[in-house]
Amino acid sequence: MTKWNKNKKFFIIFVGFILVSLAFLISYNLRNNHNESIKYALLIGGGLCELDNFNTFYKNIEYVANSLKQLGYNDNNVKILFYGGKSSNYPLIEEDATRSNVIAELMFYERIIDPNDSLLIFRSGHGMIELVDAKYGILSNSRIVSENIIPNIIGTVSVMSFPDGPLSYLEFQEFLGRIKARQIIVILSQCYSGQFVEITTQLANTVVVSETEEVGIAFTTNRTVKIWNHEVWPFVKCIFDGFLLGGCCESKQSVLTAFEYMLSCNPNVNGLPLKADRPLLRETPQIKYGKGLTKGAVYID
């Protein structure tokens, strides 16, 4: 073998060694980065048509987004859906809040989230209890009338209401069940949201906080109680204020601590201190944990 061939062989082996080493380092770094805990959040808001009062829904979303930023969430990992999509009036919005877009986001999280990560889902919008028909599935009253359907009712189901149709708590549960996060925190500011807490009986890594019981109306602007001084709804403001009690550099607050703070929150209503959970929320909020989570040991992290 000539000297040239020996040098060529040595060079090829050397380059191969370098490439294998680089591949190992890249793989190692990617694996380490992948193992870092990432905090994801999905914020969903808005009504069903242009006649809805979007401003209050948007103020809730805006307050939650700002709170999450103070809690260390990266803007790149917070997705915001709102009726109508991005506009000059709603600059934080990324996409329209539709049933199809919500499902698409949940399927996206299924692909990217690993057991080290956490996911927070917040919703400020409409909820309803719909009829379940043996043949047609979920039926709204408007569909029964418009399609002249004679229903064979087999039950009822709580749903998130969207312009392109309802998303039931059972469907929502199915999509959440595919997400392999360390923990999933769901906070619902909507009417008739109580049945969503039943998700925790099936998903061990999930905690659900609902503003109402199964039958109950969430805080609205059309109410007989005294005027709330804040544009943000009391359930929303008080529970996220509860999370912020620890601040960015102090000890963090658990979901239970924030929930308890919300129940005892004394907002100023026309200058009078009144408990937010009774005269303003109307119904008792609920919190339930998946069997794999320890009550009081789940943090918004």
Image (spheres, rainbow, N blue to C red):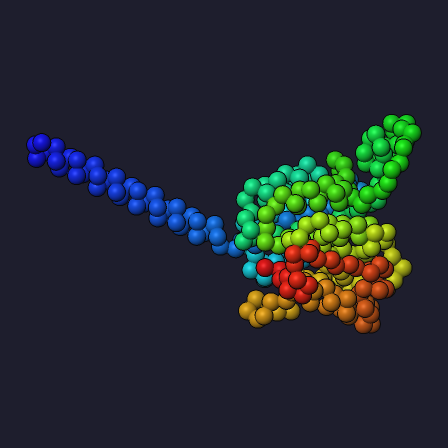
- Does 263 appear above or below 7? below
**Residue placed at 86% from the left, 51% from the top?**
215
Front-most of 178 and 250? 178
Q: Percent position (x, y) of residue 123?
A: 71, 50
Q: Using the rendered view, name the quadrant where residue 49 is placed.
A: top right
Q: Percent position (x, y) of residue 56?
A: 75, 53
**Residue placed at 71% from the left, 43% from the top?**
172
**Residue placed at 73% from the left, 67% from the top?**
260
> How many numbered markers are drawn?
0
Screen quadrant of the N terminus: top left
Front-most of 297 and 90? 297
Q: Percent position (x, y) of residue 28?
A: 39, 49
Is any atom of residue 104 visible in this view?
A: yes
Question: Furthest residue to the left?
Answer: 2
Q: Using the rendered view, name the quadrant where residue 137 is placed.
A: top right
- Does 210 appear above or below 6? below
